[in-house]
Amino acid sequence: MPIRLATVADAQEIAIVHVKAWQKSYAGIVPDHVLDNLSIESRTKRWEEILVNPETKSTTWVLEADGHILGWCSIGPNRDEGSSELSGEVWAMYVHPDAQRKGVGTALMQQAISALRNAGYEDAILWVLTNNTQGRFFYEATGWKETLATKEIEMGGTALLETRYEIYLGLIH
């Protein structure tokens, strides 16, 4: 399964995966009105902005098969306040519902960890909705460890809790 850096030409396919994965994975977690109002068109515009902006601090990788993107992940520096410059983050990772449980997420996670390591990060974090048991199971199965850190976010007028995971990347400077 080929994984490559995303380009602006990928924006619409990334947006499709983004919206479809949210609607499946977050059903029953994120308010229905939020999921129902997700727009591939507006996500495409946002991804076009991200992918052409030279100031973007994240790198996005896509996995494609038969000319279609099946999943993507974005990595970059740890965005937590006060974090070390040697700490990276998986900013986001989504797999199209039709491609879930077929190795796409695992391949993307391996790419993310490798890219973080190659960027010189010693460790990395990610945030996951606490009630997203499938996502949490996946992260734990790929080597991530739950921390005691949580934070509350607001989505569509509803307070949701996120849990932080971390992984040691094995670099010593």
Image (tube, rainbow, N blue to C red):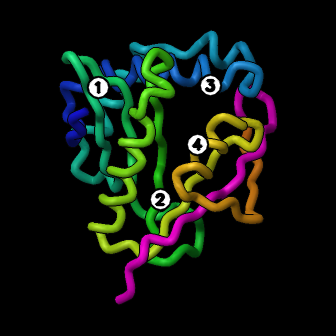
Magenta-colored span:
155-173
Name the residue tied to disc 2.
Answer: 89
Q: Quadrant of residue 67?
A: top left
10 Å crowding of disc 4: few (<14), some (14-19), many (20+): some
Q: Main secondary structure of the magenta part?
A: strand
Disc 4 or 2, which lies upstream in sequence? Answer: 2
Q: Residue at x 74, y 63 (%)?
A: 149
Q: CA distance from mark 2 to mark 3?
A: 21 Å
Q: What amino acid is found at the position of numbered circle 4 in the picture? A: Phe
Q: Which residue is mark 4?
A: 138
State the residue position of label 1: 11
Image depth: mark 4 or mark 3 in front: 4
Disc 1 to disc 4, how far (Cα)? 25 Å
First of labels 4, 3 by sequence position: 3
* Horizontal arrangement in the rendering, residue 91 relative to residue 1 (left or right): right
Q: Residue furthest top?
A: 36
Residue 45 visible to the viewer: no
For this view, does 117 lie left or right of residue 8?
right
Which residue is the site of mark 3? 25
Q: Is residue 29 above or below residue 171?
A: above
Q: Nearer the viewer, residue 147 or 45?
A: 147
Image-quadrant location for residue 64:
top left
Circles 4 and 2, Cβ within 8 Å, touching? The answer is no
Q: Are marks 1 and 4 in contact (CB under 8 Å)?
A: no
Residue 27 falls within the magenta-colored stretch: no
Q: CA–CA distance between discs 1 and 2?
A: 21 Å
Gap in angstroms between the C-alphas marked 3 and 1: 21 Å
Q: Which mark is residue 143?
A: none
Q: Are marks 2 and 3 in contact (CB under 8 Å)?
A: no
Please say whether residue 158 is one of the residues in the magenta stretch. Answer: yes
Nearer the N terminus, badge 3 or badge 1? 1
- Going by the numbered disc 2, the residue's amino acid type is Glu
